[in-house]
Each structure stands twice: as structure tokens, then as C-alpha cells.
Image: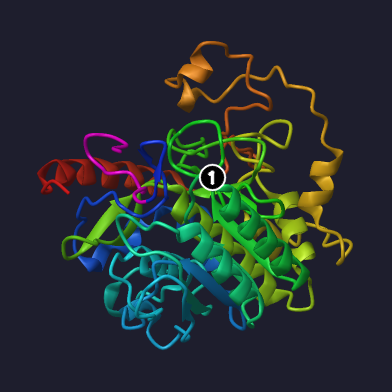
């Protein structure tokens, strides 16, 4: 349940064989005042957000957030939250987010830092809230999520973000698979979180065919200890030390989880699609896969085709959109060899019994430190920024010790 003594995991809800398995926000360690919150969003600097915004802000793109609902009064996204639909509550209201998770994901995607708040990676995106769960024991959430994905597929939303996950029943799996297939036929991109148990086995809907399953990396580009892995992983994105609005106290909190990774991957797709509105979902995904950062053979069970790098597409013109009608992820997986790799498993996951028992047992590599054009890590970050991240981390750890028990 806990990632460490200092921060709670981004996962609650839906029991799975006695475990709590649905990925949700947590990590409630209050940060400093809003005035310096932007300096704590290290991943925006790493992804060259300021330069990206000179080229694309996500304008003209709508992202459906299948989650706990989205609060339209949150300052960072006020005026850009559509009505949406609630598939979970007895008294439906997609704007009623009693948990805060869906609102935080919407802000991570599209925040405008209003009133000194958080900045999203794609600040001009519109958000379509699709409520599929609430808080704590959200039984039936996957069935609701399947309905939400199908609903979103019939709207103007180009991207469907599902920062949630669970082990499905046979009924739920069938419903999700069908909904995703329908969404793909409608020309959508569907992103979902791999899960936060730090073990083999990607959760649903991330494991559904055609879903872009997103794992988490930290500021060094290495796979996060909590990030679930498996052959379904398609991409990775930042998911450690992500500032969010606290859900149990006032102010801002630090969170870890593949939820935020998924939101940032969705936002990256929105930036690319906004700049290239004539591209299909397949073309947007293809350039994302082609330009993702990695340091070894792909795909990897830990970062898939690599760590998302929209700057490669938007600032450097890299990536060939290719055939508009061929899904590159499904096509690639049809060609993949089942032969296991002998590459080592990631250093960050060395505490896992599965890894330390046999370092050669993992099916597809690797130490997920990504390549760069000349540096050895994914992120294009100056030394000063990296140092600032370290200082912030230390400060937050001290504050975390003082937080009240959640």
C-alpha cells in the first residue's frame, strides 16, 4: 500500500485477490506555496515544455478523462471542462469529483497555472470528464470505464486517458476489449496506466489490445520501482515526484504513479495532434513510438518503445507518420518474436524477487535509462535544473515526515 514511509502509493480501490489494485492518486506530502510550484514541475523542463509551447499548446484537441470526474471550478482548467457523462454514480454528475484524482489528471494534462497553480503539458486542451469510479471501494469500475471509453469514442475527443487499472473479471475484460476496439475504429488514441505494484502483469484497461499502456520513469530516465511491467507496455513517461493538489489537506502534494505518466503521454499526443491535425491516430502514435527515448533493443517490458519525447517531433521534425490506416502498435506486436532476451532487468527493480532470483529471466530487457543525443539520459536538463530537483526532493521528504497519517 505504501511506496515508502514518506509517501502513499497512487493506488487505492477495487480489491484484487486481497490487494488494492486500482491506480489512483496519493502521495500526500504537502509542498511549499503556490508561488514556486512551477519550479517543482521538473518534467516540464525535462520535456522542454517552454519551447514546445512556442509550437503547440494542444489547441483544438479534446482529451476524455475516464476517471473520478473532473471539477470544472479548479482554477487551472476553469472554462475548459466540458459536460461529459457519469457512468458510475447513482446520481450522475461528471463534475462531482469527490476523490480529486480525475481533476489532478486533467490539470496534469491541461493546467494553465492560473492563480499560481500547476501547469499542464498541453495547456490549451479541452477536457471531457467521463466518470467511471469514485473513491475507496469502486466496485464495477472497469465495466463503467468500458462504457465511458465507448461513450468518448462517439464524441469529438481525439484522446482517451484512463489513469486507472485493475485485474478484470471475464465480463469486464470482454467489455473493455470491445470498447477499445470500437474507439480505435473511431480514430481515437487510448492511453492507460500499467499499474503501481512494481510487478509483472499490466492491469486493465492497459492490457487490452490496442491500448497504449504507459509505465513510469523518474528524473534520471530510469524505470520507477512501482511501475508494473509486461509485454503490453507501449511507452513510458514521468511519474515520480509529480506535484498535485492534495486530496486530504489544503495546498499541493507530491505523488508517484503511472497515473501521471499516462496523463503526460496523453498530453504529448495532444501537442503533436494539435500541430498536425490532418494526421490520424495511427500516425500520431507512430511518430511517438519512433521518437521515444531508449538505450537498448525495443520493445522493452518496462518502457515499451521508449520514453515519450514530443520535442523530437515538434522541435526537430523527427518521425515519419507513415500509413494513416495501420495501427503501428498492433502491427509491431504481430511481428514480435516470442524468443526471450538475455538482457538484464532494470537496476531500479532489483528488490523484486522475480528479478533478483534470475537476472536473465526477463523476457525483454532493460535498465530503462534512456538515450539522448549526446548525454546518456533522456532528459534535456541543465545541471542547475537537475540540482534543483534534488533540493526539492530533499525538502519534500522532510515535509513528508511531518504530514498527518492518511
Q: Measuring 67% from the left and 20% from the top, which residue is drawn there?
A: 343
> Secondary structure under badge 1?
loop
Q: Measuring 66% from the left and 42% from the top, which residue is drawn there?
A: 232
The correct choice, above or below, for 292 with respect to 362 in the image is: below
**Residue 20 versus residue 357: which sits nearer the camera?**
20
Crowding around mark 1 (Cα neighbors within 10 Å: few <14, some 14 to 19, many 20+) is many
**Residue 159 versus residue 322: which sits nearer the camera?**
159
The correct choice, above or below, for 396 with respect to 342 in the image is: below
Q: Measuring 28% from the left and 74% from the top, which residue is drawn there?
A: 116
Q: Is residue 367 left or right of residue 165?
A: right
Chosen colour scheme = rainbow
Tell whether position 317 is magenta: no
> Where residue 122 sits: x, y (%)?
52, 71
Q: Quadrant of residue 79?
A: bottom left
Name the residue that disc number 1 marks: 203
Q: Quadrant of residue 21?
A: top left
The overriding secondary structure of the stretch rendered in magenta is loop
Q: Quadrant of residue 317?
A: bottom right
The correct choice, above or below, for 267 with respect to 377 in the image is: below
Please identify the residue farthest to the front as the structure is shown: 171
Q: Is residue 18 left or right of residue 349?
A: left
Q: In this orientation, does residue 383 appear?
A: yes
> Where residue 318 sits: x, y (%)?
76, 57
**Residue 213 versus residue 283: which sits nearer the camera?**
213
Tell whether position 2 is magenta: yes
**Residue 174 versus residue 222: which sits nearer the camera?**
174
> Where residue 262 sits: x, y (%)?
52, 56
Q: Is residue 335 left or right of residue 173?
A: right
Region in magenta? 1-13
Amino acid at each position: 500500500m505504501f511506496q515508502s514511509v514518506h509517501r502513499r502509493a497512487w493506488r487505492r480501490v477495487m480489491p484484487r485477490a486481497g490487494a488494492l489494485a486500482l491506480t489512483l492518486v496519493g502521495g500526500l506530502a504537502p509542498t511549499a506555496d503556490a508561488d514556486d510550484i512551477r519550479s517543482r514541475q521538473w518534467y516540464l523542463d525535462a520535456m522542454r515544455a517552454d519551447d514546445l509551447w512556442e509550437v503547440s499548446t494542444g489547441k483544438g484537441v479534446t482529451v476524455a478523462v475516464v476517471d473520478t470526474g473532473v471539477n470544472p471550478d479548479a482554477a487551472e482548467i476553469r472554462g475548459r471542462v466540458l459536460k461529459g457523462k457519469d457512468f458510475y454514480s447513482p446520481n450522475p454528475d461528471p463534475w462531482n469529483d469527490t476523490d480529486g484524482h480525475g481533476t489532478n489528471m486533467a490539470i496534469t494534462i491541461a493546467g494553465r497555472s492560473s492563480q499560481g497553480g500547476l501547469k499542464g503539458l498541453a495547456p490549451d486542451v479541452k477536457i471531457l470528464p467521463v466518470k467511471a469510479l469514485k473513491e475507496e471501494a469502486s466496485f464495477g469500475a472497469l465495466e463503467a470505464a468500458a462504457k465511458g471509453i465507448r461513450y468518448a469514442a462517439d464524441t469529438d475527443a481525439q484522446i482517451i486517458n484512463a489513469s486507472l487499472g485493475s485485474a478484470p473479471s471475464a465480463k469486464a475484460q470482454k467489455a473493455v476489449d470491445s470498447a477499445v476496439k470500437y474507439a480505435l475504429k473511431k480514430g481515437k488514441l487510448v492511453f492507460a496506466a500499467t499499474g503501481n505494484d512494481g510487478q509483472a502483469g499490466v492491469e486493465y484497461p492497459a492490457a487490452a489490445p490496442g491500448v497504449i499502456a504507459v509505465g513510469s520513469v523518474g528524473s534520471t530516465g530510469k524505470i520507477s520501482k512501482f511501475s508494473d511491467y509486461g509485454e503490453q507496455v507501449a511507452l513510458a513517461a514521468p511519474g515520480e515526484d509529480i506535484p498535485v493538489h492534495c486530496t486530504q489537506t489544503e495546498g499541493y502534494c507530491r505523488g508517484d504513479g503511472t497515473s501521471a505518466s499516462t496523463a503526460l503521454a496523453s498530453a504529448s499526443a495532444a501537442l503533436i495532434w494539435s500541430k498536425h491535425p490532418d494526421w490520424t491516430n495511427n500516425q500520431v502514435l507512430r511518430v511517438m513510438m519512433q521518437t521515444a527515448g531508449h538505450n537498448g533493443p525495443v520493445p522493452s517490458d518496462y518502457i515499451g518503445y521508449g520514453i515519450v519525447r514530443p520535442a523530437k517531433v515538434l522541435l526537430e521534425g523527427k518521425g515519419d507518420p507513415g500509413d494513416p490506416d495501420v495501427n503501428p502498435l498492433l502491427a509491431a506486436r504481430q511481428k514480435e518474436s516470442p524468443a526471450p532476451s538475455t538482457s538484464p532487468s532494470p537496476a531500479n527493480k532489483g528488490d523484486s524477487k522475480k528479478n533478483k532470483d534470475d537476472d536473465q529471466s526477463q523476457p525483454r530487457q532493460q535498465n530503462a535509462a534512456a538515450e539522448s543525443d549526446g548525454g546518456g539520459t533522456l532528459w534535456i536538463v541543465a545541471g542547475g535544473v537537475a540540482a534543483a530537483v534534488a533540493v526539492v526532493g530533499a525538502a519534500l521528504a522532510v515535509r513528508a515526515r511531518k504530514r498527518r497519517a492518511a
